[in-house]
Image (cartoon, helix red, strand yellow):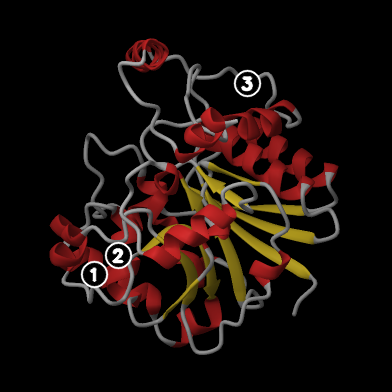
Amino acid sequence: MDNIINILCATDDRYVPYCGIMLTSLFVNNQDSKFRVFVLTDKMSEANIASMEKLADKYGNTIKIVKVDADVLKDCPIRKKDHVSLATYYRLLAPVLLPEDVGRILYLDCDMVVDGSVKDLWNQDLDDIALAAVIDEDYLGLSKYERLGLNPYRKYFNAGVLLINLEYWREHDVMGRCLECVASMPEKLLLHDQDTLNFVLQDEVKLLEVKYNFQTGFLYKGTAMEVPVAQEVMRTINSPVIIHFTGKRKPWLTHYYHPYVLKFLYYRSISLWKNYPLVYILKEDWRYWRHRFKFAMGWKRRPYITDSQKEKK
């Protein structure tokens, strides 16, 4: 396997600090590896480009900013209430945007931190498959299978962490198939490119251990999971390799209740963006303190499995 690990991210100027914090966590916990990072963006300020290059230099890695022609994806569905931007679709263009010598690449969302080594993940066997991914936190929810016409026995995966076989994508025109899906059924793609990839590649995916994309939904009490998955979650809960802060609420809010929020705040504190302010949203702030008050009064039970563990100690 190549000694250099290829990483793919997609962002715009608004999310550069969070992308930088995620990459900081990756570099800090994998200092025995070398990384070549490709950042897909339609525009990025010179100051942000300089910050990304400074981050790469600090850890002896390389970061290349790859400009995307957003017009190619102008028909991709993004709705008013969605908490993502058009950048979520950029990774579909990876086969033509990245150099031919990039045969595989690890895609990472910006709303996560890497808290361990990714060597074993990078070295996964990808022979004759398009990508490897972790099941989605709501993989048992039937609505998505019905909406997309998916085989429920092919578990729906989360697209936040994708180990992509780019050689396979080029050979089997995965990009073209995905863009055709977007053009033909945009009204059904409520979860954007994640729905697209699940629809197009449902028979061409290898499932990974949940530790490589440990989503917030795995932590909720009452989350529907099959017994083997629930057992895997409990084995992983104290040492996930990649923590994914899924959902609309993110760890960069001024008040954010989550078992792993201190992980994010730590990597932020050692990053180039340590002084970048947390985001204050009045509605979210009130929501946070209202719930904390209800927890304290015993009017509402805390939502996470880890809360139960703490209460027993």
**Quadrant of the image occupied by residue 310:** top right
Tell me: 141 left or right of 12.
left
- Amino acid at circle 3: Tyr
Which is more N-terminal, label 1 or label 2? 1
Picture quarter with the N terminus: bottom right
The reply to whether dot 3 and dot 2 touch (C-beta < 8 Å) is no
* Residue 200, position as x, y percentages in the image: 30, 75
In the structure shown, which secondary structural element does the residue marked by tag 3 occupy? loop
* Residue 304, position as x, y percentages in the image: 43, 36
- Amino acid at circle 1: Cys
Seen at 62% across and 71% down, the residue is 99
Picture quarter with the C terminus: top right
**How dense is the environment of label 2, judged by Cα within 10 Å: few (below 14), some, or many (20 and up)?**
many
The reply to whether dot 2 and dot 1 touch (C-beta < 8 Å) is yes
What residue does disc 1 label? 181
Would you say residue 94 is visible in this rendering? yes
What residue does disc 2 label? 196
- Amino acid at circle 2: Thr
- Spatial CA span between label 3 and label 1: 38 Å
**How dense is the environment of label 1, judged by Cα within 10 Å: few (below 14), some, or many (20 and up)?**
some
> Does residue 69 sit above or below 271 in this rendering?
below
Seen at 13% across and 66% down, the residue is 146
In the structure shown, which secondary structural element does the residue marked by tag 1 occupy? helix
For the image, the number of numbered tags is 3
* Residue 71, position as x, y percentages in the image: 34, 53
Q: Nearer the viewer, residue 200 or 297?
A: 297
